[in-house]
Image (cartoon, coloured by chain):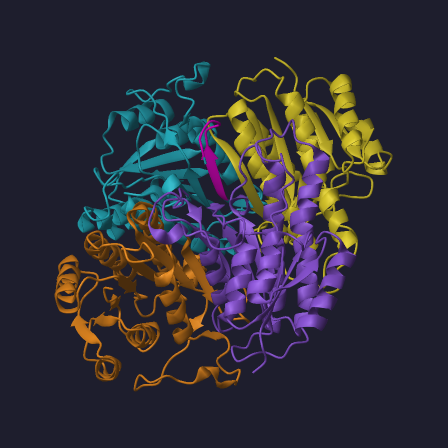
Chain colours: A orange, B purple, C yellow, D cyan
Amino acid sequence: MTKDVALIVGGGPGISASCARLFGESGMRVGVAARNPDKPVLRILEKTHGVRRYACDASEPASVALLFENAARDLGALTLVVHNIDGRVPGILGKAITEADPSMALDTIRNSALSAFLVGQQAARLMRENTPNAKGTRGTIIFTNASAALKGFPSSAAFAMACHAKTGLAQSMARELMPHGIHVANVPIDAAIGWTQEDGTRAHRRAGTTVDDNMADPDCIAETYLQLHRQHRSTWAFEIVLRPWIEKW
Amino acid sequence: MTKDVALIVGGGPGISASCARLFGESGMRVGVAARNPDKPVLRILEKTHGVRRYACDASEPASVALLFENAARDLGALTLVVHNIDGRVPGILGKAITEADPSMALDTIRNSALSAFLVGQQAARLMRENTPNAKGTRGTIIFTNASAALKGFPSSAAFAMACHAKTGLAQSMARELMPHGIHVANVPIDAAIGWTQEDGTRAHRRAGTTVDDNMADPDCIAETYLQLHRQHRSTWAFEIVLRPWIEKW
Amino acid sequence: MTKDVALIVGGGPGISASCARLFGESGMRVGVAARNPDKPVLRILEKTHGVRRYACDASEPASVALLFENAARDLGALTLVVHNIDGRVPGILGKAITEADPSMALDTIRNSALSAFLVGQQAARLMRENTPNAKGTRGTIIFTNASAALKGFPSSAAFAMACHAKTGLAQSMARELMPHGIHVANVPIDAAIGWTQEDGTRAHRRAGTTVDDNMADPDCIAETYLQLHRQHRSTWAFEIVLRPWIEKW
Amino acid sequence: MTKDVALIVGGGPGISASCARLFGESGMRVGVAARNPDKPVLRILEKTHGVRRYACDASEPASVALLFENAARDLGALTLVVHNIDGRVPGILGKAITEADPSMALDTIRNSALSAFLVGQQAARLMRENTPNAKGTRGTIIFTNASAALKGFPSSAAFAMACHAKTGLAQSMARELMPHGIHVANVPIDAAIGWTQEDGTRAHRRAGTTVDDNMADPDCIAETYLQLHRQHRSTWAFEIVLRPWIEKW
């Protein structure tokens, strides 16, 4: 049986690190791409889980194309790709529409939705060539998304645009690629996301205190991503919204 | 650690049997309730998986109350309840609104949505008393639902009403019970559902032919139910729509 | 040109009275049906606007069939039917699912959603026989709905079920009947609805005070209903959610 | 009473021309902005309805700012702004995700969603200064949208992104501006849109032939826009999907 190969685009101490650890522990070869692949969390993941690090500006077509070329050469045929870039330009939330900076809005859309388009496109190109696995899947493409994909909140028009655009992309790709055996999923996390410690090790948020109970645990998010990848093509989920038990919605 | 106890209301050879097998193989004590608990598939499940069989008319309040009383006494504190009743009165689909029989419409709503209300109510009563498990969950209540919950199709008003009502119920219960540690989930299956053989054993739909590829495999649905039950309360999914790779949507 | 004939099922001082006045002033012949057709507001509407009053228990098939027979005989071919029954059994809101009374839940569904089914069915039967008007419409069927159709709120499962069921019905009927020239619309009012004075005359809420600004004005709702009826079949709206400017959503 | 002033951004022979005519005939002062304000349809509208023509590249912040400055100076305080730009780069539909050109995708988003952001921003800035009219409205901002806002179709990822982004923008702006008395509406037209004749006069699609019945009539769309603008703030609609009677959905 061919080994699963995962590429995570966007590399921080939250969902990306949790995915890298879980996918690695599940027997996959794993690569992580980030603007700065030298961040401590990625160096630690390389040591502890053999994760391969890549530099990539995911909003640049050539950079994304090169990333996939390199990752496929280094790791083998990609079967799981996660786009995990939030893309918010700092200062964009809480800004009245009348005060919002158009260039920051466009940058947010480029960082988030356009990079998702580029990553999805390269993933689709490669996965179309894969042989279906035992579950009938040629590959899985997962887009991390946010509450703003479900509801456009006031004073954050640009982020609402970016997150909605990502949902539109995911829907279009799902309807197009699922009949070719490629599972596309959109996962809006309807909550703040918990953090892990500076050194990249897990913060034990589950130990029983309620301090972090209003935050989504990235380790749990990674579990859902793995389950999505392992679903049989007889019963694929396109969208899963995850939220903590005490979140209002 | 306390043993998980599952009660499945509605007992046929599809999702219910798949859940009973999977939950049993995962170490749970399992009960299944049906109008006729003597059907072959349930007798076989009793033999092969030690499943306890119960007679219940799920649209009758007293019958549902008695079921939960008996199941809790026999099996222990319930931690996973699945409502898996379609409830369609035969002949109700494909009927123009002008030709539809109001009493069949009301029966469909009673069989499907009212029974979901009764089952959800009894499950909530008992689960409120449970101690949270390691994932912070007092219990999980899952409603199987159908395409008609996502979209009211022509010439099937009564079924659209019943399925939409079930979604409304699930949403209300989720917003009410999740902060109490009870995970409520609505799972519309957007496809016809595959069958298992008369004797209750699995039909090997996954073997590679494409004959059944447009049908959802009940074994795969059961896996999603188990995953929902095992989610940490940090990241609960309320709704998961499952559909085959080649389904149009 | 044939005269428009409207039948409003459900007769109180809010939306029904506003519709009766507006439709009457727009040149339609108007009937209103209520359990008690002798309420002051209806007697006043009879005097001021020539509205015909009918007794009807809208949850009873025979009563609804008789209503439509009588209304068609008295008023002529029906071209606009409004179902404006909320149907909540008193005391059903704010009740935890564990404390909710199943028979009150079923009564709420019967009063609200089943009556909508019965009214929609009779309206469809008659309208199928109409000749299309200049806008290409054989008739318009409008269902007043509530916030609970958009979102199942906690501690009100039965009302969530009823309102969701009404949406499912409206969707199914719309997909079925629109190609036959019958316009079906679902109008969830996402707010409390303002009142009119005891004597049925308009309370002047629009005069400029902000006192009632968090309530939907039934006269404004009636305007939307009239606009829906007058839409050309080239561009029909199926659903319009109405909410006051300061409502949170 | 102050005169209504409408600015329509995007100027072709369909919705824009229908709006210009209807708004003008309803007593408003009307301006239309287009990349090329010299097209025949706009010259005719100038002659027949006194419509003021403006040149504007709606995807350029400075061009949009200048447009609003000029329009407010020429026409008076703007009370109704329509963003009616589709923005699709030619050749973008029907393109597999693997073949799609990223720069065309970004251009589509800039033309459509970013221009909506710029237009909405300038409209909000000016309308915030208006005095509420008799209906309590300081101004109305309407975004024309498309089927792709409701559903991401295969082989059209970029357009799905742009239309979804526009919905996200409209939602965010609505939640932010409605409590300030500015009515924001999103109007997805779920159909192809009928055309008017080359010379800008109405093509008589309503006369009774069924030839164009699967197309939305832009004159009817304009009526809905006018009704939205005239709604009392007690009952504002945020979103209205318009589709022909025989459209599948």
Q: Is residue C213 magenta?
A: no
Image coordinates of residue A25 in percent, x first then y, are 31, 77
Image coordinates of residue C242 in percent, x first then y, are 58, 45
Image coordinates of residue A236 in percent, x first then y, are 40, 54
Is residue C23 something that shows in the picture? no
Number of marks present in the image shown: 0
Q: Is D208 rendered above or below residue D108?
A: above
Examine the image and state in which quarter residue A101 appears.
bottom left
Image coordinates of residue D244 in percent, x first then y, are 46, 29
Q: Is B52 rendered above or below residue A182?
A: below
Of A87 and C30, nearer the camera is: A87
Identify the residue at image location x=26%, y=39%: D93
Identify the residue at image location x=28%, y=63%: A80
Of A247 and D31, nearer the camera is: A247
Examine the image and state in which quarter residue C95 appears.
bottom right
Examine the image and state in which quarter residue B128 appears.
bottom right
Of B30 and A110, nearer the camera is: B30
Residue bounds of the magenta highlight:
D239-248
Identify the residue at image location x=33%, y=60%: A143
Q: Is residue D205 found left or right of B56 in the rendered image?
A: left
